[in-house]
Amino acid sequence: MEETMEYGLHIDLVEVPHVNRTDYQLIDISEDGFVSLLTENGNTKDDLKLPTDDNLLTQIKDGFADGKDLVVSVMSAMGEEQICALKDIGPK
């Protein structure tokens, strides 16, 4: 007598968010914590707040106060955007 076993394969499909990373040059920091960024096509983007990460926040504020040219990396996913990294591209 031969015994057979059947294995059912069940796959759950999970939606994965589309994540973009875009670099912008930092132009200004407002008193209310918003940043003004220069887009690739020369327009300004003024709808992002400074990051909540203390280390990154300090680096951005100090670099800007020192007159450095700064580029911030912005991650966007699921309708949300946040500054996630900073590059110092030299003095202004």
Image (cartoon, rainbow, N blue to C red):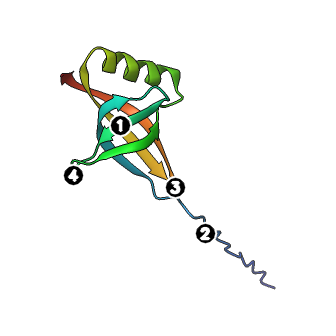
Compare marks 3 and 1 and give the one earlier in the sequence.
Answer: 1
Spatial separation of the CA atoms under disc 4 and disc 1: 14 Å
**Residue drawn at (23%, 48%), measured in percent from left and top?**
40
In the foreground, 9 or 34: 34
Compare marks 4 and 2 and give the one earlier in the sequence.
Answer: 2
Instruction: Give the residue at mark 1.
Output: 36
Instruction: Give the residue at mark 3.
Output: 79
Amino acid at dot 3: Gly
Above or below, comparing residue 77 to residue 57 in the picture: below
Q: Which mark is residue 13?
A: 2
Compare marks 2 and 3 and give the one earlier in the sequence.
Answer: 2
Which residue extends farthest right? 1
Determine whether label 3 and label 1 are within 8 Å by CB: no
**Residue drawn at (47%, 41%), measured in percent from left and top?**
82
* Left or right, residue 65 beside residue 55: left
Spatial separation of the CA atoms under disc 4 and disc 2: 38 Å
Spatial separation of the CA atoms under disc 3 and disc 1: 19 Å
Q: Secondary structure at mark 3?
A: loop
In the foreground, 13 or 9: 13
Please rate how many residues cluster around mark 2, counting C-alpha atoms within 10 Å: few if below 14, some from 14 to 19, many from 20.
few
Q: Position of residue 9 (x, y in %)?
A: 67, 74
* Left or right, residue 16 beside residue 7: left
Please rate how many residues cluster around mark 1, counting C-alpha atoms within 10 Å: few if below 14, some from 14 to 19, many from 20.
some
Determine whether label 1 and label 2 are within 8 Å by CB: no
Amino acid at dot 4: Asn
